[in-house]
Image (cartoon, rainbow, N blue to C red):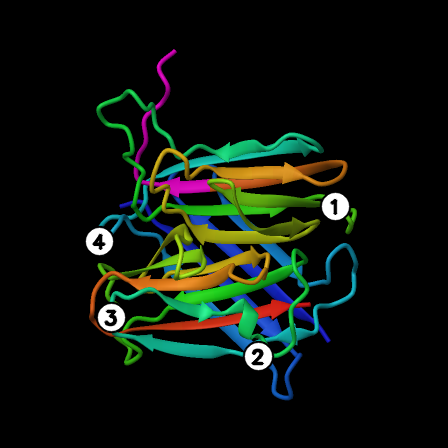
Amino acid sequence: MATTTAAVTLTSDLLSDNISVSASSTLMKAGTTADGLDMVDYGVIDIVTGDQFDLLDADNPSSSPIAGVMANKANKVYIANHATDETYYVTIMIDAQNVGRLYAGDWMFIPWGAEDANADIEITASTGTNKIEYALFHQGRTLDAS
Amino acid sequence: MATTCSVSITSDIAPGLGTINKSMTLTKAGTVTDLEETTGFSRRKLAATTAVDLITMANELVEPSDNTAAKVYVRNIGDGKGNIDKSQYVTISIGDTGGTPQEIGRLYGGDWLLMPLTVVDDKDVVAAPSTDNTVVLEYIMFFE
């Protein structure tokens, strides 16, 4: 079984008593305890100011009989903005709905429903060139026919 | 006053994939000034499939600044008594329960997320369990 583990540590001294939270999760296929997610798409790409791009496409070939094999599974997505200018950010959207901004140095880790063909993870840079690292852990998808 | 979040992802899916490590300090939008506001760490027990607001943006005591650098952490800790069911999930969405919130994805037992938020009113953090079985979510939001 492939094993992928995602761990987070969160510390904060905003409150009178410090917060320290740690969590670790082994990324499993949907609804199982025996099979780990065993596929990954990983990349680093420059996102320049201007257009909105599909960073991750929820749509397997729409005409394929096995379209939507990623839909409603246990996909996980990691995205980090490696820009160094603190004024730079990228806006993350899903199906044209604004999720939030990843400023320089920020990262995010989410489950991704990819529930239909429109549920792409979209990205737009506000200023300059933002170097984006991303990883999609999943249990299978189809490629577009050439 | 600082808040830091570190992630470590290790995988043997592919040789050489190695480990992803990244740490961030939560700062205000476009600055290196630390975020100073938080909802505090909370837990919420759910026992129905009805979608509920985990965090209602319009109800924050101090109106958060919209479209800045807010972040939220949510974890599905199972039934809250140490039992984690990997087959049960909570769908996390962003939006208004009275409308059609945009799904982010499914948090299965033990899974967690950390993501940015717009904190715009009606862009609430919405949780909908997959079954009527008890499930507990831990969560905290940091904002401006």
Could you tell me which secondary element the residue under label 2 belongs to? Answer: strand
- In x, y percent, where is residue A139? 30, 39
Magenta: main secondary structure equals loop
Q: Left or right: where does residue B134 sit relative to residue A58?
A: left
- Residue furthest toward the top? A146
Residue plotted at (41% across, 67% down): B75
Q: Chain of mark 2?
A: A
Q: Is residue A13 above or below residue B11?
A: below
For residue B48, which numbered disc appears in the image?
3
Q: Which residue is mark 1?
A: A88
Callout 4 amino acid: Thr
- State the separation of the CA atoms marked 3 and 4: 22 Å
Q: Which residue is mark 4?
A: A32
Could you tell me which secondary element the residue under label 3 belongs to? Answer: loop
- State the separation of the CA atoms marked 1 and 3: 41 Å
Could you tell me which secondary element the residue under label 4 belongs to? Answer: loop
- State the separation of the CA atoms marked 2 and 4: 32 Å
- In x, y percent, where is residue A62? 32, 24
